[in-house]
């Protein structure tokens, strides 16, 4: 495990990449203005596909009006209507728009993140480290602290500054084991400060997490991340 992350299959990601980049603009799925609530298993699967696509175009930071334009391109493509614009001729502009919008998203997230970090640092018992992260012990541990080269077993939940949970080992029902020097910097430092048995909240600025690029569509570029972590054990090699 290289990083705490949401589980998205390679097949699903490949389909989305093909959908977004491999054909005319919007050739990924049919999306009408109001599909209603999903009822059958097929409905739910298609709705989930829409969510995956939505996460993977989040970089464009679309307004409601812009989203309607994307839906229009999708519908024309899926229904094989004559396109209003030839998508192949706009690929370079799509890339340019993705870069400019992703930078816009990152700047907004960083501004929100500064407020989140400041609030976390004011919590009783919180420690803001020289690197800029904040760690607050919720339940003390009594065991040893891991070295950067150790493998650790943890339970954790990760959420964005707005409270959105993007990953949780507890929801999966099993702890996660990983080398402490193989994860994001905030975890290497923060978990390295913990003792076995400790529960703590790590508040991670974006430059100690996933930076301006974000991660797999679930974590925006520039996002400050908050992790509830319980250090269960240091795993012997």
Image: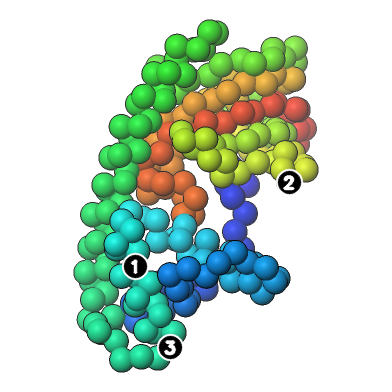
Between discs 1 and 3, the one toward the N terminus: 1
Viewer-side label of 2, 1: 1
Dot 1, how many residues are within 10 Å of its Cα: few (below 14), some (14-19), or many (20+)? Answer: some
* Left or right: 91 in relation to 17: left
Residue 220: percent from the left, percent from the top?
41, 46
Residue under numbered circle 2 = 172
Residue under numbered circle 1 = 68
Residue located 43% across and 70% down the image: 33
Residue located 56% across and 16% down the image: 136
Q: Secondary structure at mark 3?
A: loop
Residue 109: name its quadrant.
Answer: top left
Residue 84: name its quadrant.
Answer: bottom left
Total marks shown come to 3
- How much space separates mark 1 and mark 3, taking CA atoms? 16 Å
Using the image, tell me which numbered label, if any, was put on residue 163.
none
Viewer-side label of 3, 2: 3
């Amino acid at each position: 495990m290289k990083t705490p992350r949401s589980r998205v299959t390679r097949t699903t990601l490949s389909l989305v990449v093909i959908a977004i980049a491999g054909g005319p603009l919007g050739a990924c799925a049919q999306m009408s203005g109001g599909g209603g609530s999903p009822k059958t298993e097929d409905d739910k699967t298609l709705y989930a596909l829409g969510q995956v696509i939505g996460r993977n175009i989040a970089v464009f930071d679309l307004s409601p009006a812009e989203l309607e334009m994307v839906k229009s391109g999708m519908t024309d493509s899926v229904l094989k209507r004559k396109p209003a614009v030839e998508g192949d001729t706009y690929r370079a502009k799509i890339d340019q728009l993705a870069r400019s919008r992703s930078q816009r998203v990152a700047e907004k997230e960083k501004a929100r993140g500064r407020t989140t970090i400041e609030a976390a640092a004011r919590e009783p018992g919180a420690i803001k480290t020289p690197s800029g992260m904040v760690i607050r012990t919720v339940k003390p541990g009594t065991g040893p602290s891991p070295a950067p080269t150790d493998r650790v077993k943890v339970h954790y939940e990760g959420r964005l500054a707005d409270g959105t949970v993007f990953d949780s080992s507890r929801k999966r029902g099993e702890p996660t084991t990983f080398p402490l020097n193989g994860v994001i910097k905030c975890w290497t430092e923060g978990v390295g400060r913990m003792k076995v048995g400790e529960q703590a909240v790590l508040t991670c600025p974006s430059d100690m997490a996933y930076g301006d690029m974000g991660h797999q569509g679930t974590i925006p570029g520039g996002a400050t991340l908050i992790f509830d972590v319980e250090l269960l054990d240091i795993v012997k090699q």
